[in-house]
Image (cartoon, grey):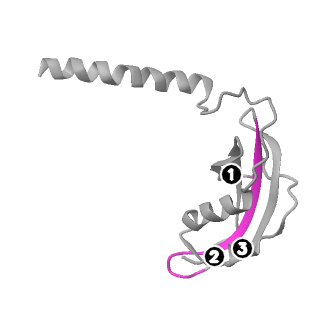
Amino acid sequence: MRNFAKRAAIVLLPLALACCGGMERGISFTDDQGTAAQPVPKNARADLLSFFRTYINNPVGVRDAALAEPVQRTVGGRLRYVSCVRYTARDMDGKYQAPQERGVMFVDGRLDRVIENSSDACAGATFQPFPELQAMTR
């Protein structure tokens, strides 16, 4: 049992140290320091549709869908492309929920994460209809 504990410590210690180091610097899977311009997302619309098909619990019958094309913004101290999406979706019982607004951040031209509280990231965004989101199926 003692050998097992030593082996576990040897395996887990570097992992724990890596996590702590990532917390200090902010975890990023890119080499940039967040100050250089990011590449423009080339497939933003298609990426957003693919993502929201799984993000929204019931993607059928989405209403009032609108999209703000990606623009560069500073998020968490890093320069990123952010696209904003507004929509009204149904819950699992088929009832419409309150309208939602989500910011979606792109890193190195690829969809990276959703910004749930998007009021700062989407401030001043210019929305256009997003009919592809409304036409989603399962």
Does 81 lie within the magenta span? yes
Q: Nearer the viewer, residue 71 or 19?
A: 71
Whichever of callouts 1 and 3 sits on the residue coming sooner in the sequence is 1
Q: Position of residue 86 (x, y in %)?
A: 74, 65
Q: Are marks 2 and 3 in contact (CB under 8 Å)?
A: yes
Q: Above or below — where is 63 with respect to 72?
A: below
Q: Position of residue 100 (x, y in %)?
A: 69, 65
Classify 10 Å Cα crowding around label 2: few (below 14), some (14-19), many (20 and above): some
Q: Which residue is mark 1?
A: 117
Looking at the rendered structure, the kind of residue marked 3 is: Glu
Residue 136, label in figure: 2
Looking at the rendered structure, the kind of residue marked 2 is: Met
Q: Nearer the viewer, residue 94 or 50?
A: 50
Residue at the spot x=76%, y=54% of the render? 83
Q: Nearer the viewer, residue 81 or 84?
A: 81
Please identify the quarter of the rendering in which residue 22 is found: top right
Q: Is residue 114 left or right of residue 6?
A: right
Q: Which residue is mark 3?
A: 132
Please identify the quarter of the rendering in which residue 44 is found: bottom right
Q: Which residues are magenta?
A: 79-95
Residue at the spot x=69%, y=52% of the render? 104
